[in-house]
Image (spheres, helix red, strand yellow):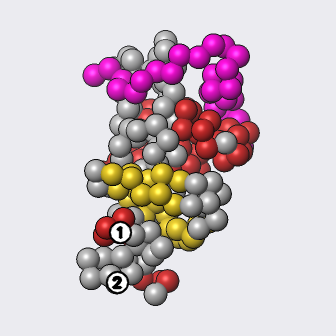
């Protein structure tokens, strides 16, 4: 199956294309710092697929076996199951496995099965993996997928993520803390 991401057509000197070359070279500290500093760049980068190969930033993280980079990219909305142009290259899961990064491949597979993800530019993925909860502070205003809509989290607000940096969203779009149907916190350690 061909890749499903919309390829962002960029010139060879565009910020996304240059950042992709850094990822391809394994310079993940530089890549992650740039993505953290600019949420618009992060939103573009996780939807970028190199036109000739269909490889994404997440394919590159899988190639290098960089779990931290993979987790951050998933948190920014990268599609874990996106297929490369060549069927033999497959998804980031397939790339990790082919390079001997079986632990990362298994973790990506598990994360893909629990993703509450919509491929909407600028909208971050959410998760229901409440047992992995960790507190974060929003560095920017955030739009997060929830159900068929979007939850907005203002800059400076406390929210919770899973181990893949996907925002935990509870019943009726609650996020600080995410709550169940009866209004009880889904974050056991933070009650």
Q: Residue furthest bottom?
A: 191
Q: Which residue is mark 2?
A: 184
C-alpha gap between disc 2 and disc 1: 10 Å
Q: Which residue is mark 1?
A: 170
Q: Is residue 41 above or below residue 189?
A: above
> Any magenta on residue 7?
yes
| Residue at 36%, 47% in the rendered image | 117
Callout 1 environment at 10 Å: few (<14), some (14 to 19), or many (20+)?
many
- SS class, disc 1: loop
Label count reads 2
Query: Which residue is drawn at the image coordinates 39% and 53% (left, top)?
Result: 150
Highlighted magenta segment, given as a residue range: 1-29
Please give the name of the residue rendered at 71% of the width and 35% of the height, measured from the top-left corner: 27
Whether residue 47 is visible, yes or no, is yes
Of label 2 and label 1, which has the lower sequence position? 1
Quarter of the image for the N terminus: give it: top left
Q: Is residue 91 left or right of residue 147?
A: right
Secondary structure, mark 2, is: loop
Q: Position of residue 108 (x, y in %)?
A: 41, 47
> Percent from the top left, x then y, of residue 3?
36, 24
Given residues 26 and 189, the one toward you in this image is 189
Q: Would you say residue 85 sits in the magenta stretch?
A: no
In the visual, does 51 lie left or right of 171? right
**Residue closest to the eye, 79 or 10:** 10
Q: Which mark is residue 158?
A: none
């Amino acid at each position: 199956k061909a890749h499903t991401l919309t390829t962002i057509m960029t010139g060879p000197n565009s910020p996304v294309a240059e950042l992709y070359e850094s990822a391809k070279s394994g310079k993940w500290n530089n890549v992650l710092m740039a993505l953290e500093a600019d949420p618009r760049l992060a939103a573009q980068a996780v939807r970028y697929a190199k036109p000739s190969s269909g490889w994404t930033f997440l394919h590159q993280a899988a190639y290098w076996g960089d779990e931290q980079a993979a987790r951050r990219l998933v948190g920014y909305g990268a599609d874990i199951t996106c297929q490369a142009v060549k069927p033999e290259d497959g998804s980031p899961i397939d790339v990790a496995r082919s390079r001997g990064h079986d632990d990362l491949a298994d973790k990506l597979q598990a994360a893909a099965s629990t993703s509450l993800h919509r491929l909407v530019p600028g909208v971050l993925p959410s998760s229901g993996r409440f047992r992995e909860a960790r507190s974060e502070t929003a560095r920017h205003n955030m739009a997060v997928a929830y159900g068929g809509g979007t939850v907005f989290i203002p800059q400076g607000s406390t929210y919770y993520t899973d181990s893949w940096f996907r925002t935990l969203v509870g019943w009726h779009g609650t996020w600080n803390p995410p709550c169940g149907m009866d209004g009880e916190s889904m974050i056991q350690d933070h009650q």
